[in-house]
Amino acid sequence: MFGSLPSVVRNHVAALRMLLVFTVLLGIAYPLAVTGVAQAAFSDQANGSRITQDGKTVGSSLIGQSFNLPKKNPDDAEEVAQPDPKWFQPRPGGYDPLVTGASNLGPNDEGLVKTIKERRAAVAEFDGVAPEDVPVDAVTASGSGLDPHISPEYAREQVERVAEARGLDAAAVRKLVEDHVEGRVLGFLGAERANVVELNHALTAMK
């Protein structure tokens, strides 16, 4: 059919056919196949590991959230939001998915040392414990600034405060924490942790 056409034209026609074939295969068929497998086998993960309440998406188990009291002046950018005693608190951080990353400050940076001391004092007063008992993750952000996990020690430290603020039995709240402690990956990688977003979501169901 194309035998009588100049070689340059035949090359262009062949290239166009290859473009169309690979566009269909890699631009349509492959994405649809991957999406289909993901939805069938890993639906929760493929859809963002969403946490729902009353049929509404309230968060993701992969991204941390701030649990603060409403600002007195919502339009005041200078006002610092205060933590809500009714919730388990996450690690420090703004939890803005559009702004991620650590401060890159070294452990000897005077500003960072001062900030950590201030955070330790604030957490100790907030949770009613001695400053030396405040876990490291209570005063330092994660590498991404979005990690929803806290250490079991930090979660346990907050039990009495949360129970008192909500009028709940401390033993029941403590059991909730232990039920949400996740073990090490494959039994030996990383450290035990608790997902504070999932923990607070479960807390709403307690009476």
Image: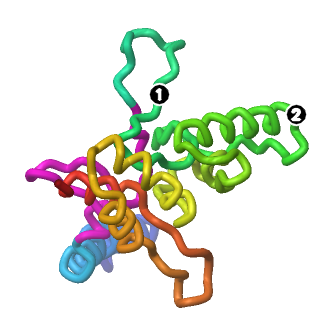
Q: Quadrant of the N terminus?
A: bottom left
* Label 2 secondary element: helix
Q: First in sequence: mark 1 or mark 2?
A: 1
Q: Is residue 189 visible?
A: yes
The question of residue 2 being in magenta is answered with no
The residue closer to the viewer here, 97 or 78, is: 78
Q: Position of residue 74 (x, y in %)?
A: 37, 14
The question of residue 65 being in magenta is answered with yes
Q: Position of residue 71 (x, y in %)?
A: 39, 19
Q: Is residue 13 visible?
A: no
Relative to residue 33, is residue 14 drawn left or right? Answer: right
* Label 1 secondary element: loop
Relative to residue 88, is residue 2 drawn left or right? Answer: left
The residue closer to the viewer here, 29 or 59, is: 59
Q: Quadrant of the C terminus?
A: bottom left
Say whether marks 1 and 2 touch (CB < 8 Å). no
Q: Residue at x 40, y 33 (%)?
A: 68
- Disc number lying in front (1 or 2): 1
Say what amino acid the circle numbered 1 marks: Gln
Q: Residue at x 26, y 63 (%)?
A: 47
Q: Residue at x 47, y 27 (%)?
A: 82
- Could you say which disc has been placed on residue 110 in the image? 2
- What stretch of residues is rendered in magenta? 44-68
Circle 1 Cα neighbour tier, 10 Å, few/some/many (<14 / 14–19 / ≥20): few
Q: Position of residue 66 (x, y in %)?
A: 43, 40
The Cα–Cα distance between marks 1 and 2, rounded to whole angstroms, is 25 Å
Q: Is residue 146 above or below residue 71?
A: below
Q: Position of residue 27 (x, y in %)?
A: 31, 66
- Could you say which disc has been placed on residue 82 in the image? 1
Circle 2 Cα neighbour tier, 10 Å, few/some/many (<14 / 14–19 / ≥20): few
